[in-house]
């Protein structure tokens, strides 16, 4: 579905593609795992420059895979890049399970992606991490990435030891209640996008700081509900 919305040059990575809608963009489809994709010498050779403006991470629904995808993606980001995590707000312990059993009973499966987002928020306070109240299992928008930062990469093995535990998962109340989540229309209607566009292709801290400042002016912070989630 995400590729069907694209009108820009795009890259899609999935070992098991199933295209059911018309795709109307210049797209390079790569039928492989994300690890194999990022192991290539020039994974984003389809682009004029190896820089990702918008990345949508939606894969295995397991925290260790999602965090690894973010680590690898950030290396190809500029300060104005936007990274979106899918399935970060499971509505129940069943939806948050590492196994797929909850999906059969409840119709949606978020997995434990929320753990990866917690690690990003905790270890990378330089990033702007915004949870968004989308149906059914939420997304997170991560702004002001730093292609040179290796904090998450160095912490990865230790983090994964805590991620991989038996179900049921301990689901934090703020995740299930969506107490941090903002409305999608508040995010899209905010005044931050001009700062993001201006920071694209730039290097250094100046562009990242301008994005953080724009988010602060718009009231978009990790703990601001910007009007609160919808019912």
Image (cartoon, rainbow, N blue to C red):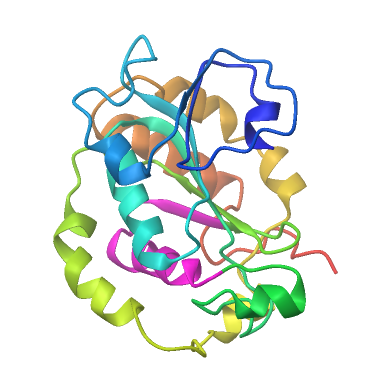
Examine the image and state in which quarter residue 166 appears. Answer: bottom left
Question: Vertical placement of 101 versus 125: above or below?
Answer: below
Direction top: furthest residue: 48
Quadrant (top left, top right, bottom left, bottom right) of the C terminus: bottom right
Q: Residue at x 73, y 55 (%)?
A: 183
Question: Vertical placement of 212 versus 176: above or below?
Answer: above
In the displayed structure, does residue 61 sit left or right of residue 133? left
Image coordinates of residue 140 in percent, x first then y, are: 55, 55
- Residue range of the region highlighted in magenta in the rendering: 111-130
**Is residue 118 rendered magenta in the image?**
yes
25 and 8: which one is in front? 25
Residue 26 in view: yes
Examine the image and state in which quarter residue 117 appears. Answer: bottom left
Quadrant (top left, top right, bottom left, bottom right) of the N terminus: top right
**Is residue 70 rendered magenta in the image?**
no
Image coordinates of residue 169 in percent, x first then y, are: 49, 86
Q: Residue at x 48, y 88 (%)?
A: 167
104 and 159: which one is in front? 104
Image coordinates of residue 207 in percent, x first then y, are: 35, 30
5 and 122: which one is in front? 5
In the displayed structure, does residue 101 sit left or right of residue 149? right
Q: Residue at x 49, y 30 (%)?
A: 196
Q: Residue at x 27, y 37 (%)?
A: 38
In the displayed structure, does residue 14 sit left or right of residue 74? right
Question: Vertical placement of 47 versus 101: above or below?
Answer: above
Query: Number of numbered discs present?
Result: 0
Image coordinates of residue 107 in percent, x first then y, are: 76, 70
Question: Vertical placement of 28 versus 170: above or below?
Answer: above
Residue 74 in view: no
Direction left: furthest residue: 154
């Amino acid at each position: 579905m995400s590729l069907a919305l694209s009108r820009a040059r795009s890259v899609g990575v999935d070992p098991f593609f199933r295209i059911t809608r018309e795709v109307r963009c210049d797209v390079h489809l790569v039928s492989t795992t994300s690890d194999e994709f990022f192991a290539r010498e020039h994974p984003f050779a389809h682009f004029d420059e190896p820089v990702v403006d918008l990345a949508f991470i939606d894969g295995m629904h397991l925290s260790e895979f999602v965090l690894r995808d973010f680590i690898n993606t950030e290396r190809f980001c500029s300060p104005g890049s936007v990274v979106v995590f899918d399935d970060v707000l499971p509505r129940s312990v069943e939806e948050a399970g590492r196994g797929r059993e909850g999906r059969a009973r409840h119709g949606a499966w978020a997995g434990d992606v929320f753990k990866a987002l917690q690690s990003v928020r905790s270890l990378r306070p330089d990033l702007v991490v915004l949870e968004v109240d989308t149906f059914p299992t939420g997304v997170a928008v991560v702004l002001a990435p730093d292609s040179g930062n290796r904090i998450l990469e160095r912490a990865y093995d230790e983090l994964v030891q805590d991620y991989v535990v038996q179900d049921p998962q301990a689901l934090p109340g703020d995740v299930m209640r969506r107490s941090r989540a903002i409305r999608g229309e508040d995010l899209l209607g905010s005044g931050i996008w001009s700062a993001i566009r201006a920071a694209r292709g730039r290097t250094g801290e100046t562009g990242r700081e301008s994005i953080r400042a724009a988010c602060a002016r718009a009231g978009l912070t990790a703990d601001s509900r910007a009007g609160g989630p919808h019912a």
